[in-house]
Amino acid sequence: MSSPAGTTGDEPRAAVFSGKRTVRAPLLLLPEELIPDTRLRMDGLVFLSLLPEAAIPVAFLDPQYRGVLEKLKYGNEGELRGKQRAALAQMSEETIVDFIRGIDRALLPSGHLFLWIDKFHLCQDFHGWFDGTELDVVDLVTWDKGTFGMGYRTRRRAEYCVVLQKKPRRAKGVWKIHNITDIVLEKVDRKTHPHAKPVGLQSALMSAVSNEGDFVIDPAAGSFTVLEAARQCGRTFLGCDIEG
């Protein structure tokens, strides 16, 4: 195979990895209702509407939905088990779409959304959630919880974090940490909240796609583990939950 014109074929290939971020988030002027590093009690869609456009480098979303439970019909959710989860306010598919569109508006170009999802939605196709946005799936992280749950056949031990990036899609100069594996074992105490997520993993992910001091948003914060993760790595949390 011949070398491209103007080369000898001996030149080193440009590295596809980079430990530096060339993307910079702008300085934000926030409305007084949005207080950083605070557990805000607010409707998530209202929260998203107050954010400036194309200014946030990273967002997390952990939708609260009953789709999988209603379709699989285990029959004892909220009675013999899962009482805390069953009592939470539920999101419809349309509401989830509205959240993702609001996040898409707030993310800066090449910004990231880390979307928590279960095996049911992963297998059934969730791509309709971000139709009409500038978001594309670029990666997937499997969280091994170290404990098993429900399942007609195999028992569910994992949850999944879908990595979406706003256009333009690129890794070099944007994703700066390259030792995060795509399967992560991290145990979480869910006694305080049924949807608590792994702080260590979330801290690593936000560190990979933001700089110290950057804002990280979570419009449906639930257990506020994203707030804890942001504190661990020197990011500025901005988020809310309808339950406070």
Image (cartoon, grey):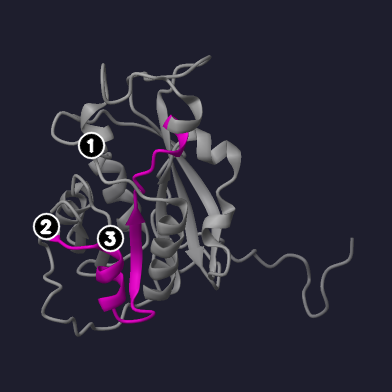
- Residue 219's tag is 3
Question: Closer to the camera: disc 3 or disc 1?
Answer: 1
Q: Residue 95 versus residue 102: which sits nearer the camera?
A: 95
Is 99 inside the magenta-drawn segment? no
* First reached walking from the N terminus: tag 2 or tag 3: 2
Q: Which residue is mark 1?
A: 87
* First reached walking from the N terminus: tag 3 or tag 1: 1
Dot 2 surroundings within 10 Å: few (below 14), some, or many (20 or more)?
some
Residue 137 located left or right of residue 113:
right
Residue 236 shows in this picture: no
User: Where is residue 160, by image quadrant?
Assistant: top left
Residue 242 located left or right of residue 110:
left
Q: Residue 199 versus residue 68: which sits nearer the camera?
A: 68
Mark 2 vs 3: CB contact within 8 A = no
Q: Which residues are magenta?
A: 41-69
Q: CA distance from mark 2 to mark 3?
A: 11 Å
Q: Residue 98 versus residue 54: which sits nearer the camera?
A: 98
What residue lies at 26% left-to-right and 46% top-to-bottom? 89
**Relative image position of residue 38 (x, y in whole percent):** 10, 61
Q: CA distance from mark 3 to mark 1?
A: 19 Å
Q: Residue 16 versus residue 138: which sits nearer the camera?
A: 138
**Relative image position of residue 85 (x, y in whole percent):** 26, 34
Q: Secondary structure at mark 3?
A: loop
What residue lies at 45% left-to-right and 24% top-to-bottom? 73
